[in-house]
Image (cartoon, grey):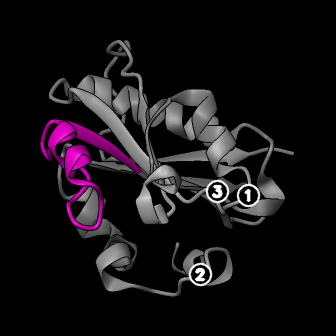
Amino acid sequence: MLDTVYRDFDTGYVPRWHGDIVDPEGTYLRSARHTLLVAVDERDGQVVATGALDARGPAHPPNPRALAERYPSGRTAQLRRVYVRPEHRRRGLARRLVGRLLDFAAADGGYGAVYLHTDPAVPGAEAFWRSLGEVVCDERAAPGGGQSVVHFEVPMRAVPRGGANGNDNHVACVASRS
């Protein structure tokens, strides 16, 4: 995940934004309400996609106050680190990972909403999230352009049969077959 912020997002590592990347175990695996999914290419064992969920709503600042109030921590499942390496895109990996994350949130039973934000400069990101959710705030339309971030709410799912995909250790591997 760390190489992504350098190679694909042009931001480099920013501790207040990317602390979860250097401590994914502490962030996503120690809490029963958080999860990290990893897709591995069976041919070479390389990680090709990730997706995570935690119980932290958007913080203010840097996000607009209204979003922090609408999506409080503890009641909000926030989708994070949904990323697919460019050479593995357009194969349904992100959609499958998000589906499993939504099942996980539903099985938790304590979440009232699923929230995420994305950088519309990332190729395909905005269109992908628009296909799954509803824009609740587009900071590009705010006076001064805000952070140029688009915030979404994704509909909650019904509780899946058998819980969150039998995900006892909060790690799932989805193989990429091509």
Residue lying at the far right in this picture: please name it.
178
CA gap, disc 3 and disc 2: 16 Å
Towards the viewer: 105 or 45? 105
Towards the viewer: 136 or 163? 136
Are the two marked residues, 1 and 3, in contact with CB atoms closer than 8 angstroms? no
- The residue positioned 43% from the left and 54% from the top of the image is 142
- The residue positioned 42% from the left and 59% from the top of the image is 143
Position above or below: 135 against 2:
above
Mark earlier in primary sequence (2, 1) = 2
Secondary element at tag 3: strand
Residue linked to disc 1? 123
Q: Amino acid type of disc 2?
A: Asp
CA gap, disc 2 and disc 1: 17 Å
- The residue positioned 62% from the left and 82% from the top of the image is 10
Q: Position of residue 156 (x, y in %)?
A: 36, 22
Residue 68 numbered tag: none
Residue linked to disc 3? 40
Q: Over which residues does the magenta segment extend?
A: 56-79
Say if residue 124 shows up in the picture: yes
Q: Which of the two marks, 3 or 2, is nearer to us in this view? A: 2
Quadrant location of the C terminus? top right
Are the two marked residues, 2 and 1, in contact with CB atoms closer than 8 angstroms? no
Mark earlier in primary sequence (1, 3) = 3
Magenta stretch: residue 64 in it? yes
Residue linked to disc 2? 3
How dense is the environment of label 2, judged by Cα within 10 Å: few (below 14), some, or many (20 and up)? few
